[in-house]
Image (spheres, rainbow, N blue to C red):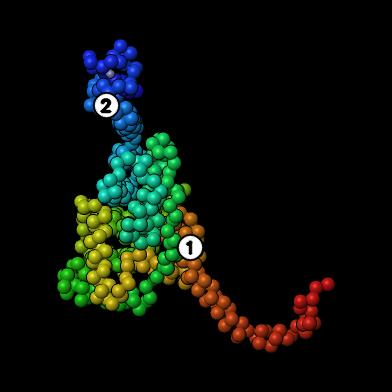
Amino acid sequence: MLTIYRRHRKSCKQRAKGRKYRHCQCPIWVDGALSGKEMRESLKLRDWQRAQDLIRQWEAEDRRIIQQEKEVTIKDAHGKFMADAQARKLNEATLYKYRLLFRQLDDFAETQKLQFLKQLDLDMLAIFRAAWKDGPRSSLKKLERLRAFLRFTERRKWIDHNPAIELKTPKVPNKPTMPFTREEMIRILTALEPYGKSAGIRNAQRLRAFVLLLRYSGLRIGDAVQLDVDLVADNKLLLHTEKTGVAVYCVLPDMVVKALDAAPHSSARYFFWTGKSTVRSAKGKWQRRLQRLFGLAKVPTGHAHRFRDTFAVELLLAGVPLDRVSVLLGHSSIRITERHYAPWTRSRQEQIEADLKAAWSNDPVVLTDGKGTPELQGKTGRIN
Ligand SMILES: [Zn+2]
């Protein structure tokens, strides 16, 4: 608290009335404490109103500083979040994505001159989000990470409520699964020849093994890159172990196993990875090789994930039940498989119906309108 008073000059006629008297023109002084520091000094002002305005301004500034010292900064908050995430042993890929988000958030805070967590209100978050260049799916994932981060700060009472909850989630169109047609598969494999001419025969062999593995195991590209040589034995590939502890194997066609054996391995332990670089960078290399191959094969929409789709869809069309395809894909629930591959379970159903119609059309009983059972005729549909 600060108080002001007049420090009467010797010549002041009101001097005897003491410092409480203010209706003279003597210099105004201030007395009290600011930020815990005692002060008593001249304001170099004579106008009472102006002096009062000045100290009010000082006091307001002081309160703001005290408040700010208690405020958590954005940088502090995400630093603590990351430390916690590491302690929770989140996997490296997830940590990487959080780091990416925080780097972006720091850049944004700098441009917007934001320092404190509380400044990240709904308006600011909306501006932040509007600048994202991600597609709807990655955008949704990023928003989930932003929410998780702010939820973390809310639980610690660094903010009063999580504004990210009110950010509307982007509409994610159902990504159509696009298996390669059989013709496209052949074009991709044929393109290995021109690929080998420029990249060398050994690299073409390696890429061929990689493509066949993706197509006939349904592995995700990251898992294919990290595939341990020891996981393939007697034509069987250990895909994963279910929560119940049951191992799930995929039987590989002979030609896939031969291709894997024939191709030079990247290291003693892995088919396609030195084990020295990050999985991320190895994955990137394979993705670029695939893109080159898709270019040569004139399949411009080619993507590693489409081999997995091809694996799943071909199985469904061959009549493998959805729940078994789901196990092979390692989905945590059959609902995920259903959502991804619904169109193909439908075409499977259409196939079945066509099969049945074809079979009935040759059935002698159907062809004779069920004659031969005359006493039953006419009774159909009547119940009594
Ligand atoms: Zn005076």
Kindly identify the residue that appears in the image at 35 percent across and 57 percent down.
130
212 or 62: nearer the eye?
Answer: 62
**In the image, what residue occupies the spot 39% across and 46% down?**
121
User: Residue 272 placed where, x, y %?
Assistant: 25, 59
Using a 10 Å C-alpha cutoff, classify the residue at mark 1 as few (fewer than 14 neighbours), some (14 to 19) or many (20 or more).
Answer: few
Residue 360 percent across, percent down from the top left: 61, 82
Q: Does the CB distance between marks 1 and 2 fall below 8 Å?
A: no
Q: In the current view of this chain or complex, which residue is farthest to the front?
A: 13
Density class for disc 2 (Cα within 10 Å; few <14, some 14-19, many ≥20) is some
- Compare residues 13 and 60 and report the one nearer the observer: 13
Q: Secondary structure at mark 1?
A: helix
Q: Residue placed farthest to the right in the image?
A: 384
Q: Tell me if residue 309 comes above or below residue 35 in the rendering.
A: below
Inspect this view and state whether residue 103 appears.
Answer: no
Residue found farthest to the bottom: 368
Q: Is residue 303 visible?
A: yes
